[in-house]
Image: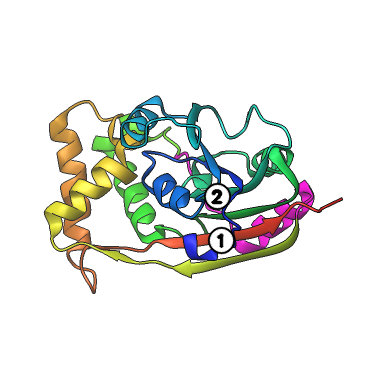
Amino acid sequence: MLARLRLRGNELVLDAGCGTGRLTAELLRKLPNGRVVGVDLSENMLRTARKELPSTDRVHFVVCDLLALPFDCRFDGIFSTAAFHWVPDHDLLFQNLYTVLKPGGFLVTQCGGGPNLRRLHERVNFLSAMPKYAVFLSRYRDPWVFSRADTAAARLRGAGFVDIKTWIEAAPTRFEHQERYLEFIGNVVLHRRLERLPSAADRQSFLQELGALAAQDKPPFELDYWRLNLDARKPTT
């Protein structure tokens, strides 16, 4: 992701959905004379980011929604990783991103897309429909939007972007053993769904059933991640 950036080193860049700031720090190193504003909807994430990167005249963190960015024509570029698939309205998202960029500003991002985690989702949906879980999970809907490359390109064009390039790439992630696999999907992928189950025993049972299925895969305990990459630019005039 960082290698895709073409920077002079003095730009003002928006890190959209910066999370704990791990990549914000890397981005700042590529801007020796520039500045970064990291935004995220999670105050908990930004609390960690501020500990790692205390605010200076070169980096600031702001709690806000990517669908309601409080900036206008301010940034030379936008950088984002693993955030856009959490945003429910991509048309409005891209319109907001277009608005905050200066003329000629760049957009370089990556998020989940295409068939991202399809195998896991199919298994989760199957288990969620079983009677012992359905009473709690039948109305639950995952919060993600995994867009196709051509759909994302059309939305970027609709928002006014030019020089658009979008592509999907496989990024399978394998875990050493079942414990690590279940820890990750329980805390990172499925935590919102699992919160709907009434007890720790129910949540553990749900995860163990997923683990038993993943153990039969070849290779076992692998998540079928797919990344959607987006490069675009706001016209200069």
Numbered-mark total: 2
> Within 10 Å of the Cα at label 1, are there few (<14), some (14-19), or many (20+) other Cα atoms?
some
Mark 2 to mark 1 CA distance (whole Å): 9 Å
Amino acid of disc 2: Phe
Query: Is 135 positioned to the left or the right of 204 in the image?
Result: right
Nearer to the camera, 210 or 149: 149
Identify the residue at the far right of this view.
Answer: 237
Residue at horizontal 40%, vertical 39%?
A: 19
- State whether residue 1 appears in this view: no
Q: Confirm whether residue 9 shows in the render.
A: yes
Q: Does 57 appear in magenta? A: no
Q: Secondary structure beneath disc 2?
A: strand
Taking the image as shown, residue 32 lies to the left or right of residue 95, namely: left
Extent of the magenta region: 142-161
Q: Is disc 2 in contact with disc 1, using a CB cutoff of under 8 Å?
A: yes
> x, y percentage for residue 60?
49, 32
- In this view, the residue in front, 155 or 73, is 73
**As drawn, is 117 to the left or to the right of 94?**
left
Q: Position of residue 20 (x, y in %)?
A: 36, 38
Q: Give the percent coordinates (x, y) of residue 55.
A: 43, 30
Q: Give the numbered dot on residue 79.
A: 2
* Residue type of the residue flagged with mark 1: Leu
**Residue at the image position 66 percent from the left and 65 percent from the top:** 165
Q: Which residue is mark 1?
A: 5
Q: Secondary structure at mark 1?
A: loop
In the image, 154 versus 103, the foreground residue is 103
The residue shown at (20%, 68%) is 220
- The residue nearer to you, when weighing 207 against 11, is 11
| Residue 160 is covered by the magenta coloring | yes
Q: Foreground mark, 2 or 1? A: 1
